[in-house]
Image (tube, grey):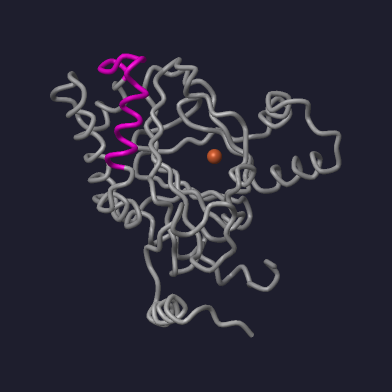
Amino acid sequence: MSQNMPPQTRRPHAAAFVQDGFCVVPSQQVSILESVRADVVAYLRSMTKGGAGLTDEAYLNAFHKFSAPTALNDVRVGVHKTLGSSEVFRQKVFACARHHLEDLVGNEIVMQRQVGVVIQAPRDPAGLLALHTDCWSGCSPYEVVLWIPLVDVHDTKSMYICDRAQTERHLREIKAGPAPESTAALARRVRPGAQDLRMKFGDLLFFSSILMHGAEENQTDETRFVLNVRFKSLFSPYGTKAIGETFLPVNYLPATEVGLDYEGEFGAVHA
Ligand SMILES: [Fe+2]
């Protein structure tokens, strides 16, 4: 497919996405991103005592000092339900990424209903994310995951990812068999070639749902705070995550609006 699209017509992050399956870019809307982070901090402060006077970044990095490990899951669920499904919050997250996203999936876009929130306290084994691809759990290979660190991330405070060439090599090996005896065995094979993502607050990661990735126990002394949410073209093929249930349109064009209204009232057009 890629031979049909001359590489020189692509902006650098789009070319990197085709080459590597992912790209890391500075958000063009840092003030909105700061507002997104402020929303998260305001919610956490409403639920948890401690950390008065700290900047938003320092507060999130030190959050494990204010919330007992046993309470962390309730906090996680609360943030997810309250902020993650808020339309205002979703629109802000979209605004942070729209500039780059349109080069990856087009301008008629669906966005996952809920923005995911990952909170991984230091040395909390519950934060471990086993090696996987999102496609293995039913995501369409046409989906793009937006991963937004709300704090600077590095080493085990971050996640690891295999680029497209590595992922495809491992997938070919799995396809050729014999299958790895366990996810852990596969992770031992894959992990040495994977990259630890080092990102600053203000950076955005876009990665394809086909890529192998995972996260290890956070061995740093700071809490990892990350938002994640998936996007795709309104009209690219869906996996098991359908429009309406998992995805909602965030932008579509006039002809599409007329067509969707027509199909909704008069039925789909078949040749
Ligand atoms: Fe994933």
Q: Where's residue 51, x and y in %?
A: 19, 21
Q: Where's residue 146, x and y in %?
A: 45, 48
Residue sitting at the far bottom: 271
Q: Quadrant of residue 116?
A: top left
Determine whether, in the image, residue 138 is placed left or right of residue 85.
right
Is residue 78 located in the magenta-colored stretch of the structure? yes
How many badges with numbers are in the image? 0
Q: Quadrant of residue 176?
A: top right
Residue sitting at the far left: 53
In the image, 14 versus 240, the foreground residue is 240
Q: Tell me the quarter of the image containing the C terminus.
A: bottom right
At a point 35% along the width and 31% down the height, the residue shown is 77
Is residue 65 located in the magenta-colored stretch of the structure? yes
Q: Where's residue 25, x and y in %?
A: 44, 51
Figure check: 100 above or below 35: below
Figure check: 117 above or below 261: above
At a point 54% along the width and 24% down the height, the residue shown is 216
Q: Where's residue 251, x and y in %?
A: 38, 67
At a point 39% along the width and 20% down the height, the residue shown is 121
At a point 36% along the width and 52% down the height, the residue shown is 27
In the image, 85 versus 220, the foreground residue is 85
Q: Tell me the quarter of the image containing the N terminus.
A: bottom right
Q: Assign ligand 1 to one image quadrant.
A: top right
Determine whether, in the image, residue 238 is placed left or right of residue 126.
right
Q: Main secondary structure of the magenta part?
A: helix
In the image, 239 versus 54, the foreground residue is 239
Figure check: 92 above or below 5: above
Give the magenta range.
64-83
